[in-house]
Amino acid sequence: MALNRKIEELREKKKQILLGGGEKAIEKQKAMVKRTARERISALVDKDSFMEFDLFIEHDARDFDMDKKSLAGDGVIVGSGTINGSPVAVYAQDFTVAGGSLGMMHSRKITKIMDYALKMRMPLIGINDSGGARIQEGVNSLAGYGEIFFRNTISSGVIPQISVILGPCAGGAVYSPALTDFVFVVDNISKMFITGPEVIKTVLGEEISMEDLGGARVHSELTGNAHFFASDEEECFAQIKKLLTFIPRNNRNGAIAVEAREPDGKFDPEKIVPDDPTLPYDVRDVIRAVVDKSDFFEIMEMYARNMVIGFARLGGVTAGFVANQPQEMAGVLDVDSSDKAARFIRFCDAFNIPIVTFMDLPGYLPGVDQEHAGVIRHGAKVLYSYCEATVPKITVILRKAYGGGYIAMGSRHLRADFVFAWPSAEIAVMGPEGAANIIFRKEIMSSDDPEETRGKKVEEYRKKFANPYVAASRGYIDAVIEPGETRACLLHAIKATAGKTVKMIDKKHGNPPF
Ligand code: HXC
């Protein structure tokens, strides 16, 4: 056959496969306001940068008439491209082909691109849109998932792994996203659950819609499984691209530094924290007041709002921000906020991103619910992650720093490299009211006017302990600074810690309180 005939043949073969599951299935996909897998990849990567691998992969299942079926690309598209000019590996499940179900060859395509991403040390982005294990392929499908989970785990901390849920992601399939670093969901499109509504109805007799069981909002607000919520696919891809500007492509490369920019001047650090320590404020305004361009990229915005996490830049350098949020439950630490902070700290540590902590919390959330939900175990994760992190750790105490909360939120004692405190800082075992009631109880009760005495004792305690100077006199903080000096101090600390080197004790690995 002449070469041009062969080229024609290649083109024809490709054309067939590029049709995916065919017109009808594509129409159905569009009716659900979903893009096709190929459209999604094009929207995600830089123009003309994608090279597809394994287009001609075919399944070799025989049972249930599978030998009579050809499935285009076996229901998944894989390859590499660039985003913002930096290489990424991508797979996108094609729901138009057998519901994007995962058979053996489908999983092999995914695991091959995962191996490639790990070897080349580039981020992996998985777009999930699948009915789960391909029922006709039985245990081979399950084996495929196991192979994916294994690679998710060994790649963790080496390359960033991003999961995008753009359709169903059901049953054990959810554990691949759950093992990755960032999960993106889209309103009305993403559906994630272990057991679906039908099983729940059969087993428990309860009726629930897929959306209420495991829709995008559920995972963004309630379960904490999702890190980014978008109202449509376009917004979701924009979020992924923005995230990739902040994080490095692997654990050996630092994040790409950009030109330093001043904050936009809309936020005055002197005016954010109210004089009255009982009043709330939005800690994100403090972050915006001090970071480059006032650009704070928040993660898990809708979950455990009493803790704020996200990325921003200081002098062009990416930093991970962890901050108590006084306008939400006074910024207490509880089960969910502990989990949220701890995993983020570990991400930053794994990928050489300095951690900046803004502290303002009255302590751990008291109550039977929290105790029984395991606040001891979950709270311990925050301590563990700060202690083991060897990246630069910079802490600013804005206001309340009480009890175990003070220790946990990146204190000097957990090896913060720089600890700054604003003059509004109150560093003590507990708040003045609680403390006075305990240590002066007898005096208060036996006085002629207990209320007046209580007031005096609270004031006495506040003067003595509710300030930064006792901690400063012991060297637990390095400098008491004016709010307006915060950016300059952070820039100094980021520069000073750039060469930080810590040798941890040799061990296989620790045993964090998961
Ligand atoms: C084979 C599947 C499939 C599957 C869907 N399809 N899921 N084929 N194995 N798991 C096929 C359908 O037969 C159909 O083929 C096409 O995909 C589109 O599916 P529809 O049902 O028409 O689409 P829709 O109405 O949108 O419903 C989507 C769905 C539903 C909610 C995902 O298909 C569904 O409930 N599927 C089964 C989900 C499930 O229970 N999966 C197993 C989970 S257990 P045709 O030819 O008609 O177009 C699991 C274990 C993993 O995954 C364990 C890892 C450790």
Image (cartoon, grey):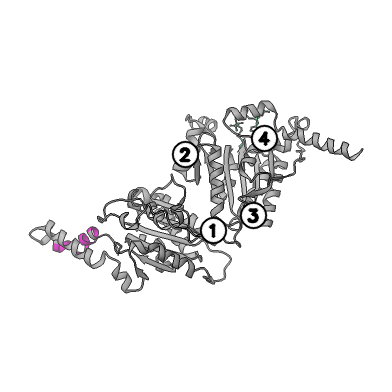
Is residue 416 magenta-colored?
no
Query: At label 1, which amino acid type do we have?
Result: Val
- Residue 259's spot in the image, x, y percent? 52, 59
Q: Nearer the viewer, mark 2 or mark 4?
A: 2
Left or right relative to 85: residue 332: left
Which SS class for mark 4? helix
Q: Quadrant of the N terminus?
A: top right
* Image marks 4 and 1: residues in contact by CB distance under 8 Å: no
* C-alpha separation, residue under disc 3 versus residue under disc 1: 20 Å
Residue wearing tag 1: 258
At label 1, counting other C-alpha atoms closer than 10 Å, the crowd grade (few under 14, some 14-19, many 20 or more) is some
Q: From which residue to which does the magenta span run? A: 433-443
Residue wearing tag 2: 218
* C-alpha separation, residue under disc 4 versus residue under disc 1: 49 Å
Residue 122 shows which numbered tag?
3
Query: Mostly what secondary structure, the magenta segment?
Result: helix
Residue wearing tag 4: 135
